[in-house]
Image (cartoon, coloured by chain):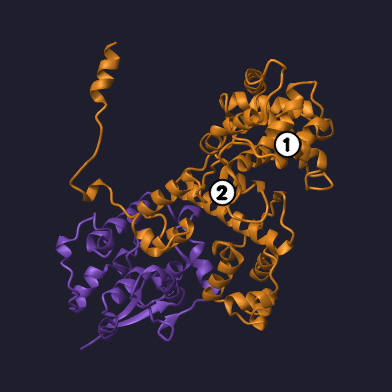
Chain colours: A purple, B orange
Amino acid sequence: MKKFSFLLLDTGPIIKLFELGIWDDFIKRCDVTISRTVAEQAKWASQDLEDIRIGLDTYEKTIDLERSVVTRFHDKFDPLYKNEIHVGEKETLAFLHNSSEPWIVCSADKAVFRVLGLLGRGEQGISLEELTDKIGLQIGISWAKVNPRDADLWKFTKKFREKYTRLGQIDRIQGQGLV
Amino acid sequence: MDIGNRLEKARKAIGYTQEKVFELTGIGISSLSAFENSEREPKISHLSKLAEAYKKNIEFFLTDEPIIEDLMLWRDEPDTNEEKKKTEAEFRQLCEQYHRLEMITDEVKSVNLPYLDVKTQDFEYSHANRLAEKVQKDFLLGDIPSMSLKQTLEEKYYVKIFHLPFNGSAISIFSQDFGPAILLNKSNKQWRRNFDLAHELFHLLTWNIFRTPDSENDKPSEHEEKLANVFASRLLLPTDFVKAKVESSTNEKGQISFEALDEIAREFGVSLEALFWRLPYLFNNISAKTIESCISKTKEINVSRPPRKSDDPDELPERYCSLAIRALNEGRLSLIQFAKYMRIGYKKAQEYLTEDEEFTDEKVFISVARYWADYKAL
């Protein structure tokens, strides 16, 4: 089976995949790249999640950009947008933005999708719902029944991604966010 | 300023040696030297670790803008320089985060604190008293100022007030970048914190009087510290109200018991010692010597009252938290960033995620239209 390639993963989906115990299954189907800082973030975030061990210390497909690359990306934004995303996400987005390959980032973060919308790269964002559907991975979640009050799952839905991508797109149309 | 200089400055600002940084981050001393001497460009993973260790936001290392070095004024600073610098770094980081939250939620407010037009060399106790009277009146602090001072400073004048446990009493800063801010010691008793807050407020109000560009020493002089105490005392213990309270509690010989004074001190949210020192200003016949003797006596005798209860203040101001929650839910702050700003774990941070009515069926609202129509009809 051909692997889903050019996939960047953000903290939220990483934690969810480990929580569901399907990380190994997932990486058999996807060629996943992770920012080293995102991997550190995931490790930090999992500290207060019982029974979840994020084992990415030896994961090899990582990116670790030089400061100047991220700075160039950082400088594209006005101060309002500069501060809103954590460095791991910033690095992931800088990598995606600079590459000529068709990278896609799977996130569960409003701010990440919003930035993608702002950059006119909304189609390079994907939710975990869409991704697992695409690779045919059954994870035992009935996405149609997930509603916004379900804070744990809602952020992994297609509707969530679409909403925040649209907000970024509106900012772009209104000329806000970029210098 | 290049990244090498920034890294070196940030390390020195928190008082760490390169060896200490190696211990904290695992980044080798030779790599660190190469980064600081601009011989090698650091990776983002290095900067992320260093930002964490130096208590800096990563943006500090992603910009070339000049570094603003604002002075911090200490009340009872710790014995070691390392401890002092660490507390300052933590406080500065919180203030910068607060300012970022204001920026991304479009809530940056201009601060218009009361001002007294007096030259440094002319500033006397009478001016400190006058300033306290002005603050009490302008801030609408009422009979018991300690009850509303903090809230008024935060909500009406947008002073950033944090509480952290540290060695020392309080710190104040009037930054060009993020405005006025005060750090209080979370471990101190409430009445002590009230006095520290009022004391630090004096420094903020007189910042431009005592911290002029040509002033030789930025540290407050002994005289300035005394002025701040006079101001705090006058502000928290308003003349007329305190005098009336004391007079109503005296016996036929014009004496007042320690218990009665303790009761008054509790009511005004100050320590018994602070109230003692206010008495000579209210009653001319009491000397400083008498006060000193009273204070030492209170330490010897058992006052037959239950111990005073103090509160446990939140480290982060309410407005800071509200802005962070708003930024998170508007998609202006990432979840991890939110967790770090709020000093909570990832799991807890997720609980703050909410959606607006676009995705919910139930709408909660209060109709004011009918009342508005009734009002207009009047």
* Residue B130 image offset from top left, x and y in percent: 71, 25
Q: Secondary structure at mark 1?
A: helix
* Residue A4 image offset from top left, x and y in percent: 26, 81
Depth check: give the residue in front, B322 or A163: B322
Residue that badge 2 annotates: B162
What residue appears at the point 52 percent right and 36 percent down from the top-left corner?
B151
Between disc 2 and disc 1, whose residue precedes? 2
Q: Chain of mark 1?
A: B
When the figure is inspected, residue B266 is found, relative to residue A137, above or below; the finding is above
Label 2 and label 1 in one chain: yes
Label 2 crowd bin: few (<14), some (14–19), many (20+), radius 10 Å: many
Residue that badge 1 annotates: B229
B204 displayed left or right of A151:
right
Asked if residue B114 can be seen in this view, the reply is: no
What residue appears at the point 22 percent right and 70 percent down from the top-left corner?
A130
Q: Secondary structure at mark 2?
A: strand
Distance between the Cα atoms at labels 2 and 1? 21 Å
* Residue B334 image offset from top left, x and y in percent: 40, 60
When the figure is inspected, residue B208 is found, relative to residue A90, above or below; the finding is above
Q: Which mark is residue B159?
A: none
Q: Quadrant of residue B280?
A: top right
A6 displayed left or right of B134:
left
**Image marks 2 and 1: residues in contact by CB distance under 8 Å:** no
Q: Amino acid at mark 1?
A: Asn
Asked if residue B48 can be seen in this view, the reply is: yes
From the viewer's perspective, is the residue at label 2 or at label 1 nearer? 1
When the figure is inspected, residue B80 is found, relative to residue B30, above or below; the finding is above
Depth check: give the residue in front, A105 or B271: B271
Q: Quadrant of residue B145?
A: top right
